[in-house]
Image (cartoon, rainbow, N blue to C red):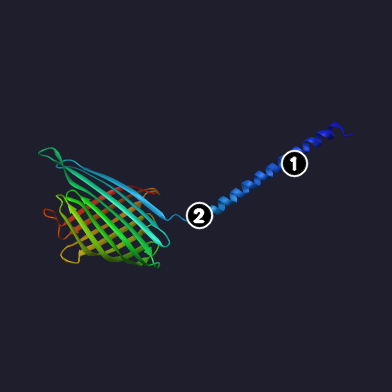
């Protein structure tokens, strides 16, 4: 006959074995989950996209009163075989007439560009570029420039990038009053992106469009600027925009220049 202590030991022993088995099972499962998470983190593809949203407000008071606001956004997704780009800009300005004390619009325009690039080689690519513009001051309901073509990355380094591209273009313009104009032309563009310092970037672009039917009908869109990342998420930028239209609509100037300063958020 077993003593009472021995009987209790035999009763407790299975419980201890079950507890140890459960603990080992949980530990093994946790270890497997940890290894799986680490493997997933190691094999997860790197982030290929980035973007930013910028805004700015300028106010002037004294001999003249004016308020200028703008909102700008960019998005880029650069992958192994193709790139996707999008940018948009909205400008609005009012000036107070001292005689009538009424606000008059001096700027009210919106621009947007979408672009797809396919890389045939690391440097040579084909693309499709779509540009839209609306400008109330120019009585322009919208301007559309659609352009396919090919391009070449002349310089493709980590801190310095420069590329040129060109191709045919179809331009369609619609003005207030139902006036329309459309024509086929050529489009040539060049783009520079230079990381001057660790957190400071210089960028510039120039796009030229000319009608094949009338060589006097051409326009150039230029922009250049500097962007400084104060933190990983917050940035300050200063940009100069210049549009030149050799055959503007009646009553409009040929050249339109704008300086904008912004504070932005990087994502």
Q: Considering the numbered disc 2 on the image, is that residue within a helix, a strand or a loop?
A: loop
Return the disc, 1 or 2, that comes first in the chain's sequence: 1
Q: Position of residue 140 (x, y in %)?
A: 18, 51
Pointer 1: what residue?
Answer: 17
Q: Going 16% across and 63% down the picture, which residue do you hit?
A: 217
Which residue extends farthest left?
Answer: 99
Residue 46 versus residue 61: which sits nearer the camera? 46
Q: Is residue 83 left or right of residue 177?
A: right
Pointer 2: what residue?
Answer: 44
Residue 147 versus residue 160: which sits nearer the camera? 147
State which quadrant residue 221 falls in: bottom left
> Few, some or many C-alpha atoms within 10 Å of disc 1 (few <14, some 14-19, many ≥20)?
few
Q: Going 83% across and 33% down the picture, which residue do you hit?
A: 5
Q: Is residue 136 left or right of residue 165?
A: left
Q: Is residue 220 left or right of residue 125?
A: left
Tell how many labels. Answer: 2
Q: Is residue 227 left or right of residue 29?
A: left
Q: Position of residue 198 (x, y in %)?
A: 39, 56
Q: Position of residue 27 (x, y in %)?
A: 65, 45
Does 31 sit above or below residue 18?
A: below
Residue 164 versus residue 166: which sits nearer the camera? 166
């Amino acid at each position: 006959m077993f003593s009472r202590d021995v009987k209790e030991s035999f009763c407790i022993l299975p419980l201890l074995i079950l507890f140890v088995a459960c603990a080992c099972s949980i530990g093994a499962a946790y270890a497997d989950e940890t290894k799986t998470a680490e493997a997933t983190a190691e094999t997860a593809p790197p982030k290929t996209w980035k973007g930013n949203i910028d805004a700015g407000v300028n106010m002037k008071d004294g001999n003249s009163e004016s308020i200028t606001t703008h909102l700008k956004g960019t998005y880029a997704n650069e992958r192994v075989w193709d790139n996707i780009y999008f940018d948009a800009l909205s400008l609005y300005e009012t000036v107070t007439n001292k005689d009538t004390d009424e606000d008059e619009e001096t700027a009210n325009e919106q621009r947007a560009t979408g672009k797809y690039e396919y890389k045939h080689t690391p440097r040579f690519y084909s693309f499709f570029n779509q540009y839209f513009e609306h400008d109330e001051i120019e009585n322009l309901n919208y301007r559309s420039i659609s352009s396919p073509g090919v391009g070449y990355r002349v310089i493709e380094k980590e801190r310095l990038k420069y590329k040129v591209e060109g191709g045919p273009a179809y331009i369609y313009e619609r003005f207030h009053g139902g006036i329309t104009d459309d024509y086929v032309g050529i489009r040539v563009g060049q783009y520079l992106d230079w990381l001057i310092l660790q957190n400071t970037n210089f960028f510039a672009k120039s796009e030229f469009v000319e009608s094949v039917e009338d060589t006097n009908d051409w326009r150039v869109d230029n922009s250049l600027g500097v962007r400084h990342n104060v933190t990983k998420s917050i940035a300050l930028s200063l940009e100069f925009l210049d549009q030149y239209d050799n055959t503007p609509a009646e009553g409009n100037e040929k050249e339109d220049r704008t300086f904008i300063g912004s504070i932005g958020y990087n994502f």
